Image: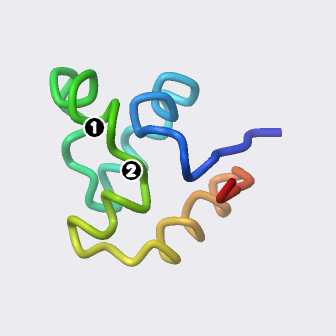
Amino acid sequence: MKEINLNSSLFDITEQFPELIPVLVKQGFQGVANEQMRTSHARVMTIPKGCEMLGIDLNKVVKVLEVQGYTVKSA
């Protein structure tokens, strides 16, 4: 089972599931496509924080991840 913890950093999530990079980019997380950004800023950024900063609907992102076959947890 593929499980994503919303408290994990975008770096950790994309290291564990690199196939999510294009999925996250499509949702508006453009920075994860840039390796330098992913290995720096993404180390401290979570999906909820990124959604808040970028004006992205967190519920929509969670639904997309679930459709992709991931279980999303918030703790």
Secondary structure at numbered mark 2: helix
Q: Decide which of tag 1 and tag 2 comes sooner along the chain.
A: 2
Residue at the (56%, 30%) spot, across then down? 17
* Percent x, y of residue 22: 37, 43
70 over 2 or under it: above or below: below
28 over 4 or under it: above or below: below
**Mark number for residue 24?**
2
Q: Is residue 23 left or right of residue 50?
A: right
Secondary structure at numbered mark 1: helix
Q: Is residue 20 left or right of residue 75?
A: left
| Image mark count | 2
Q: Is residue 12 left or right of residue 25?
A: right
Which amino acid is tagged 2? Answer: Leu
* Percent x, y of residue 23: 42, 49
Mark 1–mark 2 distance (CA, rounded to whole Å): 7 Å
**Mark number for residue 32?**
1
Question: In this view, which residue lies farthest toward the right?
Answer: 1
